[in-house]
Structures are given as structure tokens and as C-alpha cells.
Image (spheres, rainbow, N blue to C red):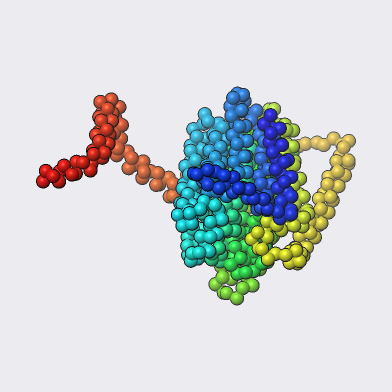
């Protein structure tokens, strides 16, 4: 029943929204919300259409994957029904967020997205860490809602309207400083959902705690709602876009770098992927920043490549990151662990999962001929185009952004070399179950579908860039068909790269097929790997996740909080030894943990109020009633006292 309802919604919605996105159409419908809500505008443009198409893909694959994945937890029927109900409600609330433009209704459904996500995250509610992660997400999301509420109240008090279009009126009637201040409020509010640094600390806790298909949806589309909110704000604000773009670039570069730097030193596979979500949000933000600067400089090409790169990366990231989370979920489904240090050699037991995880890892590292390369190429094109300005300080700023993006790409490649190598290559680092095998076909089908899209976008990028013309036209109204054709012609190199990639894939497939034919009737003998004369090899002689990143960890030690456990005897062949490191986020420690300790310390001073003595509790009630009486008759008492004196 749930699946049928979901399919009907996705097919019906996707067909309409595809037409809107491709044609650049616009739908507006006003609902009468009564005295309290006023008019509720429903507006669907190419940006809404693009975002909902991305949501539909991830929601569908997540449902298909999760249907079988949840069987691993063996939930009872009521719990499964509750999970699917929240899943559908989350989907509907995300759709409403993308189309409604009434402040009250928007915040209501934004809150509904938060609550549904919280209930989906805490599926394994018997685990203390899961509840902690869910509550952490809930609290931080509400801090974001608080900033959004302040921004919306500011607009309503200034314009008297709760329509999103009043943002346009407000920004055009006030100095640019007001627009920048207002945008910063929105950036913080939407930034909590998107996971920009320093509003990111819920991601590394929530992703490992949630079921893998929910982690995929959180990373693939829920954090993108924050990006959607920022894009919608840029569309409506008529202010100093140059300053706004520079603010976005600064936050984004820092987010991308910090996210990937922390990802490398993680030992939990899903926690590692969570930090990579922060990194990719940074990359999307860089594209948005470039596009916004293009609006400020009235440089149409700069705006075009910036927003096109950002919007395409929204789709690309939802694809390869959801595939990575599905791969991590498959590993957990069969091995029962996500600790990289306990894995290894899975490529022999789970070849299909290994292959698709490798494709996703190459895509997220920005390597051709996969989809991540295409969107990052567009963003690089925008950065190099921005260098043509005559302002030295601005050019220097852009050069630093380019260096930051280069570092992000290099570190991402290093991280996934470690992740894939340690998890899937080598020999097992722990005793796997004897029945360990490839996951069921029902979990593989959605992964193959995503892999197909990743490859298709990488091989035929010109068609997907054309799909983005109408969403980008919202930001660059002067973008005519002739100008679009000129801009697109500058990316013919991507078509050539796609053709070369297609040839390489065909040749590689042909070589593997010929190899299969040659070896078909041959007996393949297996023997131990030569150990250079050492006769007692074991799994401990191969790289661990910690040793692989040891040099890197030493380089970035100032930004890490590392807890180390080391126990061994100084013998040539020690019987027992242990070495374990656990890296903690320094921003989370200083921004969250330290302040929470101070709040707890302050609240502990009032522990005496809750002492378990019933007469004391009764006296609290009497004091409260007395206080109410005094306040109610305060005016009469004050007059009586004045009369007396």
C-alpha cells in the first residue's frame, strides 16, 4: 500500500514537474488560509521542479532499499507501519516546503520535516547513542527554526505580509546593509539544515545512528532543503549580491575543507560519509557563491556556471552519496559492524556492493567519466572566469578559493582510497560470519539504478546541463536561447571527455569479457602470497585505517582532539597488544560540549528544588497561587498602600 501510494505520487509529480523544469513554466495558486494564515501562495517554478525531481529519485530508491534492509532489524508490524507512515509524511512535507510561500505554513512544514526525520533516525530506539543523536538533531534543528522565525518576523513587521514576495519588497525599499543582515539570519537558519560549518555537529551523530536508507535521504535531500532555502533567498533578496556571494564563498570553502579533513580520520564508515556530506555542501555553496557574485558583477556567464554547477551538484551528490550510504548499509547488513578497523577483504564476498561503492567513491572524488566531475568542472570554470576581474584583492580571494577547492578534491580522493582499500581489499581483520555473502537482489536493484544515473550523467553531460537552463534563468533573467547556446558551446570539452570515457568503458568491458572467455574452462589455483621469507603472516601485517592516515593525522593534529589507547609489551613477538585512536571534532567540543557543561553546572545549583519531599512540592504550588493573587491585585494593593501613607 505504501509503495503503491509512493509510486503514484512520484510518477504524477515527476511528470508535471519535469514539464515545468524543461519548459521554464510557472504555476501559482492561492489558497485562502483564513484570518490567521491569510493567503497561502503555492508557487511552482523551475527551481522547485528541479528540487522535487531530486527528492523523488532519492525517496524512491530509499524506499526500495529500506524495505529489505529493515528486515535485518526484524521489527514488529506496528513499528514497521509507523516507520513507513513517517517516511511518507516526510516526503509530503518536503514537497510542500518546496512549493509553499507563506511564512507560517512554510515553518509548520519545515518543523514537520524535522519531526519526521527525528522519528526515522531513532528507529533503533533501544540504543542510547541513537536517542542521543536524535535529540541532538532535534534541538539543533529548532535553533535553525528560531533564526528563520526571527527573519520572517522582521519581514512581517516591516511589510505587514507573510508572503515570500514581501522579502523582495523589503530588500528593495531598505539599504543594502539590511539585506545583508537579513540574509545572514536566513543563512544561519537554513545552514543548520544544510550542515554548513559551524552548524554541522548533528550530522556525524545522526547519520551513524539512523538506518542506512534514512542516512541516504538525510544526506541526499534533507540537507538540500537548506540549500533550496538559500537559493530561494538569493532569488528574492534585492541587495548587495557581491557581499552576499563572498560570505557564502567563505563559509563554503571552510565547510568543504573542514568536512573532508575530519572525514579522513574517522573509523566509523557512516560517520566518515557524514563528514563528506559537509564537504559536498561546501562545494555546492562555492557554486552558489560564484553565481551570486556573478549577479553582483552583472556577469551572466559567471552566474550561469556558478548556479548550474551548484544545482547539478545537488543532483550528483544525492546520487553518489545515497549509493555510498546504501553500500555502507549493505556492509552492516552482512557483517554487523561499520568499524573500518574490523573490516577488509569484502570484495571477494560482496563483489557487486564493492563495485558500486567504488563507482560512487570515484564520482564523489570528482574523477571522470562520472557525474561528480561534471558539476565540479562547471564550478572550476566559474572560479577561473572570476579571475578575469581587474580587482587585485578580489582575484586573490578567488585564487584562495580555487586552492581550497583543489585541496578538497585531493583530500576526498585520499579519503576514499583509504575507505575502499581498508573495507573491501586485503584480508578480513575480524572473523566474519560463515554465511556472509552478497546482499539480496532487492537491495542491489536501487543501487544499480543510481549507478546507471551516475555513469549516464558523466558520459552525456550536455543533456543534463541543458536541463538546468530554466532553473538558472530564474537567477539570470537576461539568459536568452542564443546566449545559452554560446555558453553551452564552451563546454564541448565535457562532451569529448564523455565520448572518451564511453570508449574506455566499452574497451574495459570487452577486455573483462575476453578474460572471462579465456579463463572459463581453466582451473584457477590459489596459493598464499609470498611474504618475503616471513613464514607467519597474519591480517595484522596489513594497513589499518589509522596507520594509512597516520602521517596526515600528524599534520592536522592542531585541529584534532585525539583520544589514544595504547597497550603493548616491548617484545619481538608480543602475545597481546592494543592500539586505538578516537578523533573528536574540536568545533563540536568548544561550541556544543563545553557550553553544555557550563549550563549543566549552573542548573545543578538548583538541584535542591527537586528533593523528593512532597510537603515542599505542595508549598511550591501554594507559593505560585499566592504569586498569581499578588499580581492580579497588584494595582489595588498599590493604591491601598498609597492611601495608607
Please indicate, yes or no, whether residue 74 appears anywhere in the rendered image.
yes
Q: Is residue 329 left or right of residue 481?
A: left
- The one nearer the camera, 37 or 172, is 37
Image point (51%, 58%), residue name: 183
Image point (72%, 41%), residue name: 12
Query: Where 179 falls versus 313 (above or below)?
Result: below
Residue 181, percent across and down?
47, 60
Residue 90, percent across and down?
60, 38
- The one nearer the camera, 16 or 283, is 16
Image point (43%, 45%), residue name: 593
Residue 97, percent across and down?
59, 46
Quadrant into which the N terminus falls: top right
Total tally of numbered discs in the picture:
0
Q: Residue furthest bottom?
A: 390
Please indicate, yes or no, whether residue 364 appears anywhere in the rendered image.
no
Residue 112, percent across and down?
54, 40
Query: Where 56 falls versus 290 (above or below)?
Result: above
Image point (19%, 41%), residue name: 637
Amino acid at each position: 500500500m505504501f509503495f503503491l501510494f509512493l509510486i503514484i505520487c512520484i510518477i504524477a509529480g515527476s511528470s508535471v514537474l519535469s514539464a515545468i523544469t524543461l519548459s521554464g513554466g510557472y504555476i501559482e495558486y492561492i489558497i485562502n488560509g483564513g484570518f490567521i494564515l491569510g493567503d497561502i501562495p503555492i508557487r511552482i517554478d523551475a527551481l522547485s521542479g528541479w528540487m522535487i525531481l531530486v527528492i523523488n529519485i532519492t525517496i524512491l530508491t530509499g524506499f526500495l532499499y529500506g524495505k529489505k534492509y529493515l528486515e535485518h532489524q526484524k521489527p514488529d508490524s506496528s513499528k514497521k507501519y509507523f516507520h513507513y507512515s513517517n517516511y511518507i509524511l516526510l516526503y509530503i512535507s518536503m514537497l510542500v516546503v518546496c512549493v509553499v510561500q507563506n511564512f507560517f505554513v512554510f515553518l509548520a512544514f519545515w518543523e514537520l520535516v524535522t519531526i519526521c526525520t527525528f522519528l526515522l533516525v531513532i528507529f533503533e530506539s533501544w540504543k542510547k547513542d541513537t536517542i542521543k543523536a536524535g535529540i541532538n538533531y532535534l534541538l539543533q534543528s529548532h535553533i535553525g527554526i528560531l533564526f528563520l522565525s526571527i527573519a520572517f518576523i522582521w519581514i512581517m513587521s516591516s511589510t505587514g505580509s507573510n508572503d515570500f514576495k514581501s522579502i523582495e519588497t523589503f530588500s528593495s525599499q531598505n539599504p543594502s546593509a539590511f539585506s545583508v543582515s537579513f540574509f545572514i539570519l536566513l543563512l544561519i537558519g537554513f545552514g543548520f539544515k544544510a550542515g554548513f560549518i559551524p552548524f554541522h555537529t548533528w550530522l556525524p551523530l545522526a547519520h551513524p545512528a539512523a538506518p542506512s536508507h534514512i542516512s541516504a535521504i538525510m544526506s541526499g535531500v534533507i540537507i538540500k532543503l537548506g540549500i533550496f532555502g538559500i537559493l530561494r533567498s538569493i532569488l528574492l533578496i534585492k541587495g548587495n549580491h557581491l557581499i552576499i556571494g563572498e560570505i557564502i564563498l567563505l563559509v563554503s570553502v571552510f565547510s568543504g575543507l573542514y568536512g573532508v579533513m575530519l572525514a579522513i580520520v574517522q573509523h566509523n564508515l557512516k560517520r566518515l560519509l557524514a563528514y563528506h556530506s559537509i564537504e559536498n555542501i561546501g562545494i555546492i555553496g562555492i557554486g552558489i557563491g560564484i553565481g551570486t557574485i556573478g549577479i553582483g558583477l552583472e556577469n551572466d556567464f559567471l552566474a550561469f556556471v556558478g548556479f548550474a554547477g551548484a544545482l547539478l551538484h545537488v543532483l550528483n551528490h544525492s546520487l553518489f552519496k545515497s549509493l555510498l550510504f546504501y553500500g555502507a548499509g549493505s556492509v552492516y547488513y552482512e557483517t554487523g559492524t561499520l568499524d573500518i578497523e574490523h573490516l577488509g577483504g569484502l570484495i571477494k564476498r560482496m563483489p557487486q556492493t564493492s563495485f558500486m561503492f567504488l563507482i560512487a567513491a570515484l564520482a564523489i572524488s570528482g574523477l571522470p567519466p562520472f557525474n561528480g566531475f561534471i558539476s565540479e568542472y562547471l564550478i572550476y570554470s566559474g572560479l577561473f572566469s572570476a579571475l578575469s576581474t581587474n580587482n587585485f584583492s578580489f582575484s586573490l580571494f578567488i585564487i584562495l578559493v580555487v586552492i581550497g577547492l583543489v585541496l578538497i578534491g585531493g583530500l576526498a580522493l585520499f579519503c576514499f582510497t583509504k575507505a575502499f582499500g581498508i573495507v573491501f581489499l586485503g584480508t578480513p581483520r575480524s572473523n566474519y560470519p560463515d554465511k556472509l555473502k552478497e546482499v539480496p537482489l532487492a537491495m542491489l536493484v536501487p543501487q544499480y539504478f543510481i549507478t546507471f544515473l551516475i555513469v549516464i550523467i558523466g558520459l552525456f553531460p550536455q543533456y543534463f546541463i541543458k536541463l538546468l537552463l530554466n532553473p538558472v534563468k530564474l537567477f539570470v533573467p537576461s539568459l536568452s536561447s542564443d546566449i545559452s547556446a554560446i555558453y553551452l558551446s564552451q563546454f564541448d570539452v565535457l562532451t569529448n571527455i564523455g565520448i572518451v570515457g564511453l570508449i574506455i568503458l566499452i574497451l574495459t568491458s570487452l577486455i573483462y569479457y575476453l578474460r572471462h572467455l579465456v579463463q572459463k574452462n581453466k582451473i584457477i589455483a590459489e596459493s598464499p602470497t609470498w611474504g618475503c621469507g616471513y613464514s607467519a603472516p597474519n591480517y595484522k601485517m596489513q594497513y589499518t585505517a589509522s596507520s594509512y592516515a597516520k602521517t596526515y593525522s600528524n599534520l592536522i593534529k592542531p585541529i584534532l582532539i585525539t583520544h589514544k589507547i595504547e597497550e603493548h609489551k616491548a617484545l619481538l613477538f608480543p602475545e597481546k597488544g592494543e592500539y586505538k585512536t578516537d578523533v573528536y571534532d574540536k568545533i563540536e567540543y568548544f561550541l556544543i560540549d563545553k557550553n553544555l557543561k557550563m549550563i549543566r553546572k549552573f542548573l545543578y545549583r538548583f538541584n535542591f528544588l527537586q528533593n523528593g519531599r512532597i510537603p515542599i512540592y505542595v508549598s511550591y504550588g501554594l507559593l505560585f497561587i499566592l504569586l498569581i493573587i499578588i499580581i492580579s491585585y497588584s494595582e489595588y494593593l498599590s493604591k491601598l498602600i498609597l492611601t495608607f501613607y
